[in-house]
Image: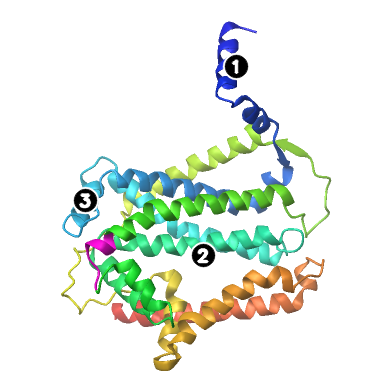
Amino acid sequence: MSGTDNQSETLLERLALDGLIARVRDLQVSSDSLTWSRFCGSLALVLVVLLFLSGAFMAFYYSPSPGAAYDSVDYAQFSIPFGDVVRGIHHYSWNLLLVVMGLHLGRALLLGAYKAPRQFVWVSGLVIMLVVPAFIFTGDLLPWDQKGYWSTQVRNSIMGSVPVVGDFQVRMLQGGPRLGIVALTRYYVLHTIFLPGLFLFLIAGHFHFLGHRGLSSPVFGRETARRKVPLVPNIVNRWLVLFIVVAVVLGLVAWYWPAPLGDPADPTDSTYVPKPEWWVLFLNQLVGIFTGPLTVVGTVIIPGGLVGLMMALPFIDRSPERHPARRKKTMLVAAVISLLVLGLSVMGYIEHHLTVLE
């Protein structure tokens, strides 16, 4: 063994990292991890890392005060070299992440990957999906432009309609009767400190359950004998290639189609009507359908019931059968809910986007 190796080994021992590194090198995963059917999980992790890196870059230049927030975002996007690319990657990554997570969830539902013994893999994944909208809600306000300001006002009014806790939640977020410096600071702290910490903890928990229970076995075709492959370098190298490809593609998209930045927020311009994002169109329609005393149905009961049903699914559908053709009741319910969500989204798009164009 060379002197350099001795020095490096001694340093690792002094840092108490030698055992950890050895365990990482010995980690092996199923060869199923290399198949295209597992692509969405790897892509979701790539997008999360891109969001963290691009968000950290923008935080260097951001000033969380109403008088400077918009100018700091404008400066970071248009005056810093490749600032428009970084902000664009951040913008397109979260949009793509929602799509990828939806596909990942749909695959798990279709193939019965939520069944025993992977119930908590499913539950932890759903909790992660519920945290992602909180990132978007808190991040929308940070540029302090018209869209972000008035979208937040709409969301806060919807949140305030929730019985018992709604008004308290709004006051905690806003820190006062209206959006101002306190609200912007609190949204910034939530977006950059508390939510990322919670998110990393949930991802670690998801990987813990996944590592403990393993990947679900194939449903279609003949099941072949599983072989083990090293996590390092086999899986890690493939993930890094995927990371580079996605970063380049999103960077090119951001270069040609920069992330939108509207006019500075004007709290006195009550005529501005923000258009709901594509992923909340169905929720927006529910709020529009159930009005007055029934508002709570669209804001709490239906969305909460849907989330509760999905959380409870592994404990309701306890049969060992995983083939979708032999799980007709579950597939029928899932199809009906999906069609309702799609229908409400189309209605919302026609009402809030196509009518504006006309």
Residue 289 highlighted magenta (yes or no): no
Element type where label 3 sits in the image: helix
User: Which residue lies at the image location 25% right of the left edge and 45% below the top edge?
Assistant: 61
- Image coordinates of residue 19 in percent, x first then y, are 65, 27
Q: Quadrant of residue 80?
A: top left
Which contiguous range is marked in magenta?
178-184
- Image coordinates of residue 150 in percent, x first then y, are 27, 72
User: Which residue lies at the image location 38% right of the left edge and 57% below the top edge?
Assistant: 190
Q: Which mark is residue 9?
A: 1
- Image coordinates of residue 270 in percent, x first then y, are 20, 78
The total number of labels drawn is 3
- Image coordinates of residue 252 in percent, x first then y, are 38, 46
Nearer the observer, disc 2 or disc 1? 1
Q: Is residue 211 above or below residue 109?
A: above
Q: Which mark is residue 130?
A: 2
| Mark 1 crowd level (few <14, some 14–19, many ≥20, 10 Å Cα) | some
Which residue was labeled with disc 3? 72
Q: Is residue 315 above or below residue 37?
A: below
Q: Pointer 2 and pointer 3: residues touching (CB < 8 Å)?
A: no
Name the residue type under label 3: Ser
Element type where label 2 sits in the image: helix
Q: Earlier in the sequence, mark 2 or mark 3?
A: 3
Q: CA distance from mark 2 to mark 1?
A: 43 Å
Nearer the observer, disc 3 or disc 1? 1
Q: Quadrant of residue 110?
A: bottom right
Name the residue type under label 2: Leu
User: Which residue lies at the image location 20% right of the left edge and 44% below the top edge?
Assistant: 79
Q: Quadrant of the C terminus?
A: bottom left
Q: CA distance from mark 3 to mark 1?
A: 46 Å
Q: Earlier in the sequence, mark 3 or mark 1?
A: 1
| Mark 2 crowd level (few <14, some 14–19, many ≥20, 10 Å Cα) | few
